[in-house]
Each structure stands twice: as C-alpha cells, then as structure tokens.
Image (tube, grey):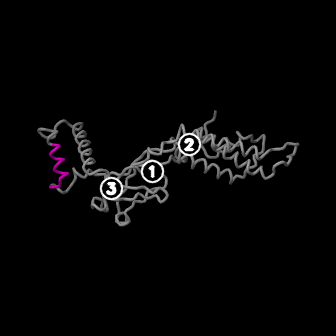
Amino acid sequence: MAIISTRQGLIDYSLRRLGEPVIEINVDEDQIEDKVDDALQVYQEFHGDATTRAYYQHQMTAADITNKYVTIPAHILYVTKMFPVNNSMVQSSNFFSFQYQFAMSDMHNMTGSGMTGGMAYYEQTQQHLALIDMKINGLPLITFSRRANRVHLHSDIEDGQLTAGKYVAFEVYQTVDPTAHSSVYNDMFMKDFTTALIKEQWGQNMSKFEGMQLPGGVTISGRQILEEAKGEITELRERMRLEQEVPPDFFVG
C-alpha cells in the first residue's frame, strides 16, 4: 500500500475510494480543496495525534507590559503555564528578600559543608530551589484567548516582576503542520474523514438533480449519497471523541 505524503495524494485517494475513475465524482476542485481544509481543521483541533507539547520563548517588550498581554503564533492551540526563564531566587538582586534568604538557608542545610557532590548534586539543588520558589511565589497568573492569539498577564506585572527585556517561556500545545510532517496525510482518520466530507459534497451537488437519468440508463440518488456521508461523518466524529480526542481538562492550566 502506497503511503500518502501530499495533499494531492490525499485528494486522489479519496476520489478513488468514492469510485473514480469508474464513476464520475461531480465535485468541483474548489469544493474538494475546501473539504480537505475542513478535515485538517477538525483533525488539528480535536485529534490527539495532531498536537504536540512545546515551549515557546518570548522576550518581553514595553508594549507587552503596557498592553498586559503577549501575542503568540496562530498555530498554538493552548497555553497552560508561563515560567520566567531565570530563577528569580538564585539570580535575585535583593539579597535581603525573604525568598533569597530562605533559598540560601535551605541550600546551606542541604550541602552541609559547602557546594560538594558535583553537577548531579547541583542539579538536584536547583530543582529543589525551583520547587521552593514555585511554592512561595506560585506560577504566574495568565489567561489565554485563543481566537485573539493573546496570553493575558496578571499578577506578575502588578508586582513588577515582568519588565521589558526579560524572557519568559510558555508551555503550549501546538498543531502539527502537515507541510512539515507529511505523515498527517496518511493518518487513517484523515483519509476516512476527507473521503466522507467529499462524499457529502457530492451528495449535496447530486441531490439537486434527484431522479434524473444519466447516460446509459443509470440513476444516481444524490439524497442517498448525502445521507450515507452524514452517517459516516457522525460515526467518525464520535469514534474520534471516544478513542483519539484529548480530554478538555487536559489543557486547563
């Protein structure tokens, strides 16, 4: 079986499944392109295999501070957390702050006679201090507006912790780009769903000529094709919801 790796390959596969070239599929090229776009949108928004976790780094600007939001790329679907890139306790310039003194005291208690134990122990210490920082300060409070592609910032701006020039990192879930990952076109759900959507469009087109006899005495029922396609679409959506969709609360940060 040939592996589909292009958009056109997916279109050709779907048309063959519907009967082409034995049967003429009465769907315009623009309509087919629209249905592929619809299939990709459903796949990217709801299918578990179409999203990947990543970390998006951003350098704060004066406009970000004034607006109290950060604009992010459109391919990012969810933002769950925001982290300052630098550890605020270890690199704090305020040596008399409670957080800094607590961290230094805790580090002294762990090391006993100074920084010994090599890089492994140093890494464990850094992780422990980061945990203390999170417990004391908490993670920055954010809300994500997906359609506006904005992450709204709250407490850290009022506290003066976020300033222009400082880097922050967002834990995000982003869509898999089919132009970079061509295996999307060979996904079984994508193949089935694209075929069903094109079939639905075919049924809609042919239902306008219901009862007309084609050359050779063949009569195609557009209404029947349309109803079959709607049933297939419903079944595929339900199967994806039960077996492949990421639970909504997974993205609640």
Query: Looking at the picture, how far across and down is residue 29, in whole percent?
Result: 70, 52
Q: Residue at x 84, y 48 (%)?
A: 211
Q: Nearer the viewer, residue 166 or 245?
A: 245
Tell me what residue is drawn at x 16 percent, y 47 percent: 104
Front-lying residue, 181 or 73: 73
Q: Is residue 181 left or right of residue 156?
A: right
**Position of 190 compared to 54: left or right?**
right
Q: What is the number of the mark on residue 238?
A: none
Magenta segment boundaries in residue numbering: 96-107
Residue 187 placement, left or right of 158:
right
Say which label, 1 or 3, has the lower sequence index: 1
Q: Position of residue 112 (x, y in %)?
A: 12, 38
Mark 1 touches mark 2? (CB < 8 Å): no
Magenta run includes residue 104: yes
Vertically, is 24 above or below 69? above
Residue located at (25% from left, 52% from top): 88
In the drawing, what numbered circle is on residue 184?
2
Q: Earlier in the sequence, mark 1 or mark 2?
A: 1
Residue beneath disc 3: 167
Name the amino acid type tagged 1: Tyr
Q: Is residue 152 shown left or right of residue 107?
A: right
Identify the secondary structure beneath mark 1: strand
Indicate the secondary structure of the residue bearing disc 2.
Answer: helix
Q: Earlier in the sequence, mark 3 or mark 2?
A: 3
Give the spatial CA distance, label 3 vs label 2: 33 Å
Evaluate whether residue 189 shows in this view: yes
The answer to whether the residues at label 3 and label 2 have Cβ atoms under 8 Å apart is no
Chief secondary structure of the magenta span?
A: helix
What separation in Å lies between label 1 and label 2 (alpha carbons)? 20 Å
Comparing marks 1 and 3, which lies closer to the viewer? 1
Q: Quadrant of residue 111?
A: top left
